[in-house]
Image (cartoon, helix red, strand yellow):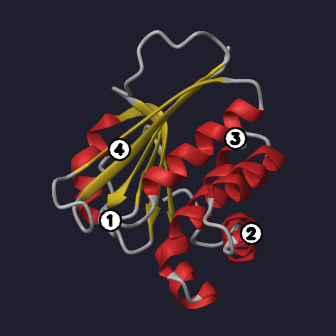
Amino acid sequence: MMRQELRLSGSGGQGLILAGIILAEAALHDGKNVVQSQSYGPEARGGASKAEVIISDEIINYPKVNKCDILLCLTKKAYDKYIDSLKPGGMLILDSTVTDRPERDDIKIYSIPILETASKEIGKPMVANIIALGSIYELTKIVNKESLEKAVLNRVPQGTEELNKKALEEGFNLILKHEESTYGEVC
């Protein structure tokens, strides 16, 4: 039986709510049971933001994530707030700007330049969420690649499809290119 609980966290305006919706939709395309929820601080843009996704082969009785299997943190504030919610055996995916590391040897930690790639490689910081999804996919294979691509194209604003396809590809490549280097290395 497969059940994965994910928490995507960062600051408002980074598109993590949309990323959670896209991931949930991709899992639906795969025929999985899915629950997706979100919350953000009263500041909205710039405040803390999180999206939660539960993907399961079985019926999901409780729709909230208590302890997550996969935690994405794009900001230090998100890391500080949610690091204690990561299960033993879980996966922590940090943007490379978050330099803190937990004193835990029971999790896998990946440091990936998601925000830098959005700004420098693509020139659009707003696609960091799609780059993050590509990286999550390559690290976990949690959904079908085709399902993820379909969900991205279905959910992004009209006219931005090519930009977002490129961002998703960059996310895949961040992991594939750097599997043997510092980005893909378990810290």
Q: As shown in the figure, which amino acid type bears the numbered disc 2? A: Lys
**Which residue appears at 49% of the width and 74% of the height?**
126
Among numbered discs 1 and 4, the one appearing first in the sequence: 1
Q: Residue furthest front?
A: 158
CA separation in Å, label 2 and label 3:
15 Å
CA separation in Å, label 2 and label 1:
24 Å
Q: Secondary structure at mark 3?
A: helix
Labels 3, 4: front one: 3
Residue 41 visible, this angle: yes
10 Å crowding of disc 4: few (<14), some (14-19), many (20+)? few
Q: Position of residue 70 (x, y in %)?
A: 49, 41
Q: Quadrant of residue 123?
A: bottom right
**Which residue appears at 58% of the width and 9% of the height?**
59
CA separation in Å, label 1 and label 4:
19 Å
Q: Which residue is mark 2?
A: 165
Q: Which residue is mark 1?
A: 75
CA separation in Å, label 3 and label 4:
31 Å
Determine whether label 2 and label 1 are within 8 Å by CB.
no
Q: Secondary structure at mark 4?
A: loop
Q: Please, is residue 4 above or below residue 134 in the view?
A: above
Left or right position of 177 against 66 = right
Among numbered discs 3 and 4, the one appearing first in the sequence: 3
Q: As shown in the figure, which amino acid type bears the numbered disc 4? A: Arg
Name the foreground residue: 71 vs 17: 17
Q: As shown in the figure, which amino acid type bears the numbered disc 3? A: Ala
Q: Which residue is mark 4?
A: 104
CA separation in Å, label 2 and label 4:
35 Å
Q: Secondary structure at mark 2?
A: helix
Determine whether label 1 and label 4 are within 8 Å by CB.
no
Q: Which mark is residue 179?
A: none
Determine whether label 3 and label 4 are within 8 Å by CB.
no
